[in-house]
């Protein structure tokens, strides 16, 4: 109490000296009021209180064990030997030392409470300190005192209380920080949406490419099947043409094989009348005319066969020529159809690419 008054007297003395030179602007704040209205501090204090309650529970248990041991020792001391009494006293002493060590660990100058308070509460206290510094600088305060500290303040004027200003400053700072965080989240969300849109576009392109490839393969397969069918039909037609040619060749060979026989028969028939004429000049004119008629008859039969063979050959040639013309027309029609189909395929490809 004496120390508080001494400090206050010194401050008043310094203020009086200052007033003698120039006007002094002094403000004050209520740190307890400020901290109670800062959500971060109340949350941090709640965490600290929970830890403190846990630690006090452990210490209370050890303390209860010590009291139980002491009570039992006092009740049974008259019945125990000196050695047993000494052992129990040592057990009690060990428990007391354990209690002190644990208490020091939790609540000592560098204990867990100090470290946790520094870790949790210090950021809030730093906010308050920074707000005080900024307000003092902007409002041109020469001094800002803490009403809730050990300093004794006999009278305070409410208009010099800057506690609400500091609270507003902290709230604004928190809102600015929250807005920054929200902005970052929005930017991250927009980037995520853009990435998702890019992925969707990429997937759509991949699907289009896969569809085009599928269509292309289907078209190639259809063309391949058509080509194989066309080749099979062409091979079948060639087979039929070759068979027809073979039949014609066989017919020609048959005609050629029969022709020399007919000629030899003609020659023999011609020679026989000549011999008859040479040996039998005395035969009548009627016999000679008969031989001439037979010779003419044989000659006309050979000519008929030759003409028939020529006719068959010409018919075969005409048939082959007709088949060739039909084959050429089919090839031309197939080529035109294939060209038309390829043109349609190219147009569909261009349409798909334009999409």
Image (cartoon, rainbow, N blue to C red):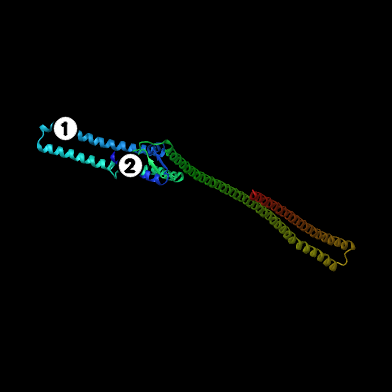
Q: Quadrant of the N terminus?
A: top left
77, above or below 193, in the image = above
Depth check: give the residue in front, 264 or 41: 41
- Which residue in the rendered view is the most extreme toward the front? 20
- Left or right: residue 22 compared with residue 104: right
Q: Please report whichever mark, 1 or 2, sits nearer to the chain's N-terminal start.
A: 2
- Which residue in the rendered view is the most extreme toward the bottom? 278
What secondary structure is marked by label 2? helix
Q: CA distance from mark 1 to mark 2?
A: 56 Å
Residue at horizontal 55%, vertical 46%?
194
Depth check: give the residue in front, 291 or 50: 50
Q: Looking at the picture, how far across and down is residue 50, in whole percent?
A: 34, 36
Q: Which residue is mark 1?
A: 72
What secondary structure is marked by label 1? helix
Report the number of numbered marks. Answer: 2
Depth check: give the residue in front, 222 or 17: 17
Q: Looking at the picture, how far across and down is residue 185, in whole percent?
A: 49, 44
Q: Which residue is mark 2?
A: 9
């Amino acid at each position: 109490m004496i120390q508080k008054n001494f400090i206050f007297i010194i401050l008043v003395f310094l203020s009086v000296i200052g007033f003698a030179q120039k006007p002094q602007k002094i403000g004050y704040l209520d740190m307890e009021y400020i901290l109670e209205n800062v959500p971060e501090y109340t949350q941090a204090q709640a965490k600290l209180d929970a830890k403190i309650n846990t630690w006090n529970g452990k210490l209370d248990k050890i303390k209860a064990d010590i009291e139980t041991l002491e009570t039992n020792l006092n009740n049974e001391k008259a019945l125990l030997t000196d050695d047993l009494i000494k052992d129990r006293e040592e057990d009690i002493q060990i428990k007391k030392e354990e209690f002190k060590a644990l208490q020091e660990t939790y609540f000592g100058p560098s204990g867990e409470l100090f470290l946790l308070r520094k870790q949790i509460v210090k950021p809030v206290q730093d906010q308050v300190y920074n707000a005080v510094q900024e307000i003092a600088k902007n409002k041109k305060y020469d001094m800002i005192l803490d009403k809730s500290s050990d300093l004794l303040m006999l009278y305070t004027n409410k208009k010099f209380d800057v506690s609400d200003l500091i609270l507003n400053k902290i709230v604004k700072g928190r809102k600015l920080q929250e807005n920054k965080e929200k902005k970052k989240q929005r930017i991250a969300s927009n980037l995520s949406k853009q990435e998702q849109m890019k992925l969707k576009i990429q997937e759509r392109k991949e699907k289009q490419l896969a569809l085009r490839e599928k269509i292309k393969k289907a078209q190639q397969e259809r063309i391949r099947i058509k080509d194989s069918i066309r080749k099979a039909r062409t091979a079948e037609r060639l087979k039929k043409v070759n068979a027809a040619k073979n039949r014609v060749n066989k017919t020609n060979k048959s005609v050629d094989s029969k022709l020399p026989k007919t000629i030899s028969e003609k020659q023999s028939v011609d020679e026989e009348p000549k011999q008859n004429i040479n040996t039998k000049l005395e035969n009548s004119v009627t016999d000679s005319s008969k031989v001439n008629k037979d010779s003419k008859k044989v000659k006309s039969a050979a000519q008929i066969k030759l003409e028939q063979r020529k006719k068959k050959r010409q018919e075969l040639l005409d048939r082959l020529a007709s088949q060739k013309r039909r084959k050429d027309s089919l090839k031309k029609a197939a080529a035109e159809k294939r060209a038309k189909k390829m043109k349609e395929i190219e147009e569909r490809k261009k349409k798909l690419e334009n999409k």
